[in-house]
């Protein structure tokens, strides 16, 4: 279980911005969390950030999964439990978009291109798991769908995703040989399989960014999300963690952004500004 008491201030600001802007533009927001994060919410009196908090769903998570490897599965597990159309937005992302009017089966921030297996290994070549993809195209050729922001208007998408993911986790757990096992297995389930199910099964889609992210060229800046009205810390968190001066400036800029554009939120944040490290 992570220690949420070690959040930097910029992370806390994004957490509250994520919820605040969703409420403004798209309606009520629910937090689904584990007992550890719920304690963090309670200790810091953060119940005002969300309209509803569910700290029971994740108590039913299977206990025989290595969550250091499959750390995105709790998020998927929560999604699989939903009975009505819903959206999922990461806590390190905020959007100024109003998404209520989109009618496609699935709406998402962006796809990810990976033609050579940089981020999404070529598991379709692995005989221990490739039979799981028999109902999909043989090379899983379609882009992954980054799940930082997704609206599910058609829950049928999740049925096959659930079935494949659960079997993939069970089988691959017996042979975690990839050198980047701490992340490639879990995002393969969450994002690569999702993208191929959506495209192969003919679900209607809407990508909010003008173009996908290229996983094969990390050196190229990716502005498409910002241009679409979405701000995602993403891998930038690690850079900010490691660079105090850059983190300090980013934090001040974020505070200015909130105070200038969302003064009501800033007023609520003021008692917390000295609680987290800049």
Image (tube, rainbow, N blue to C red):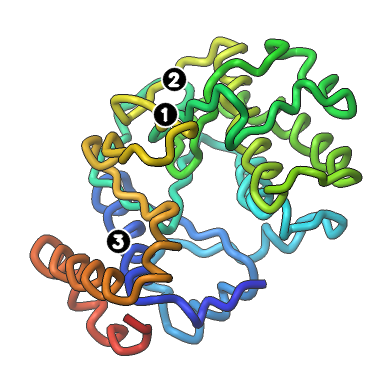
For the point 46% across and 41% down, the residue is: 87
- Secondary structure found at label 1: strand
Specify which label sits upstream in the sequence, 1 or 2. Answer: 1
State the residue position of label 2: 205
For marks 1 and 2, give the CA distance.
Answer: 6 Å
For the point 37% across and 83% down, the residue is: 276
Label disc, if present, on residue 7 of the rendered structure: none
Label disc, if present, on residue 17 of the rendered structure: 3
For the point 75% across and 43% down, the residue is: 178
The one nearer the camera, 20 or 165, is 165
Instruction: Answer above or below: position of 24 versus 187.
Output: below
The one nearer the camera, 250 or 10, is 250
Task: For the N terminus, give its image quadrant.
Answer: bottom right
Are discs 1 and 2 less than 8 Å apart at CB?
Answer: yes
For marks 3 and 2, give the CA distance.
Answer: 26 Å
Query: How far from the left and from the top, in percent, is residue 27?
Result: 33, 48
Specify which label sits upstream in the sequence, 1 or 3. Answer: 3
Horizontal side, residue 240 vs residue 76: left or right: left
Query: How far from the left and from the top, in percent, is residue 113?
Result: 48, 26
Query: How far from the left and from the top, in percent, is residue 200?
Result: 61, 12
For marks 1 and 3, give the CA distance.
Answer: 21 Å
For the point 28% across and 34% down, the residue is: 224
User: How busy is the neighbourhood of tag 1: few (under 14 within 10 Å), some, or many (20 plus)?
Assistant: many
State the residue position of label 1: 107
Q: Quadrant of residue 252?
A: bottom left
Horizontal side, residue 21 vs residue 190: left or right: left
Horizontal side, residue 91 vs residue 208: left or right: right
Query: How far from the left and from the top, in percent, is residue 182?
Result: 69, 53
Specify which label sits upstream in the sequence, 3 or 2. Answer: 3
Q: Quadrant of residue 120?
A: top right
Task: For the C terminus, give its image quadrant.
Answer: bottom left
User: How busy is the neighbourhood of tag 3: few (under 14 within 10 Å), some, or many (20 plus)?
Assistant: many
């Amino acid at each position: 279980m992570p220690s949420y008491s070690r959040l930097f201030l910029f992370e806390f600001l994004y957490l509250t911005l994520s919820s605040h802007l969703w409420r403004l533009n798209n309606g009520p927001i629910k937090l689904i969390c584990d007992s550890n994060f719920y304690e963090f919410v309670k200790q810091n009196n953060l119940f005002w950030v969300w309209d509803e908090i569910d700290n029971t769903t994740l108590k039913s998570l299977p206990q025989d999964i290595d969550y250091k490897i499959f750390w995105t599965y709790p998020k998927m597990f929560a999604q699989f439990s939903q009975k009505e159309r819903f959206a999922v937005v990461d806590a390190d992302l905020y959007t100024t978009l109003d998404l209520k009017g989109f009618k496609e089966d699935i709406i998402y921030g962006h796809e990810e291109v990976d033609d050579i297996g940089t981020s999404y290994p070529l598991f379709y070549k692995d005989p221990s798991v490739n039979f799981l993809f028999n109902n999909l195209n043989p090379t899983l050729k379609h882009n992954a769908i980054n799940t930082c922001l997704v609206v599910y208007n058609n829950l049928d998408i999740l049925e096959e995703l659930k079935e494949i993911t659960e079997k993939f986790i069970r089988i691959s757990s017996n042979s975690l040989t990839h050198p980047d096992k701490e992340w490639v297995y879990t995002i393969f389930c969450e994002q690569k399989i999702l993208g191929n199910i959506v495209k192969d099964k003919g679900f209607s889609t809407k990508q909010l960014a003008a173009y996908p992210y290229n996983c094969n060229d990390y050196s190229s800046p990716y502005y498409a999300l910002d241009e679409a009205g979405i701000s995602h810390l993403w891998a930038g968190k690690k850079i900010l963690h490691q660079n105090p001066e850059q983190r300090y400036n980013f934090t001040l800029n974020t505070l200015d952004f909130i105070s200038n554009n969302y003064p009501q939120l800033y007023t609520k944040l003021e008692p917390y500004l000295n609680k987290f490290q800049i």
